[in-house]
Amino acid sequence: MNRFTVLLGAALLICQASYSQSGANDSRRAEVVESHQKYLEELNLTEEQKPRFEAINETYRNELRALGNSGGTRMEKLRNLQRINGRRDQEMKKILTDEQYTIYRKMQKEMKAELRSERR
């Protein structure tokens, strides 16, 4: 009985810790979703552009995850990040109007600045 109580207590502590962490992740996830919605509204994509836009983002999101999990020096990762972003920007330029692309680039710069300020 005593051993069972200890195991139950340990399991409850683990669940509580993971619940607390998931609460923070849920909050961050909600911020990301809200930011993404704002992003889409400002771009004012057509119905034809939306699936292409999302497909491009999903492709490069997966590449960025793989880059983050890969080995290599920070400098190598930075160079690869720049290449990935350059390819994504070229693909975006093909599907967006000039006005939309200008908004896209402006928002990319804003997000980059926000990430930098969060790190400090």
Image: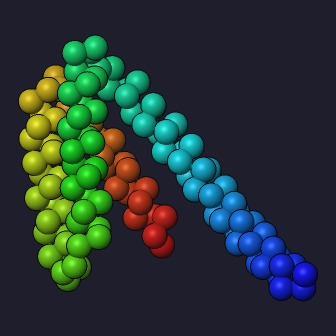
Residue positioned most to the right: 1
The quadrant in which the N terminus is found is bottom right
- The x, y position of residue 64, in whole percent, is 25, 58
- Say which of 6 and 12 sits in front: 6
What residue appears at the point 14 percent right and 76 percent down from the top-left corner? 76
Q: Is residue 106 above or below residue 27?
A: above
- The x, y position of residue 89, in whole percent, is 15, 43
Q: Is residue 13 visible?
A: no
Q: Is residue 10 visible?
A: yes
Rendering quarter of residue 56: top left
- The x, y position of residue 83, in whole percent, is 11, 58
Task: Indicate left or right for 106 with 18 as reference.
Answer: left
- The x, y position of residue 70, in whole percent, is 23, 73
What residue appears at the point 11 percent right and 37 percent down from the top-left corner? 91
Q: Is residue 27 above or below residue 10?
A: above
Q: Is residue 101 above or below residue 76?
A: above
Residue positioned most to the bottom: 2
What residue appears at the point 15 percent right and 55 percent down from the top-left corner? 84
What residue appears at the point 20 percent right and 83 percent down from the top-left corner? 73
Task: Indicate left or right for 26 with 47 as reference.
Answer: right
How many labels were placed on the picture? Answer: 0
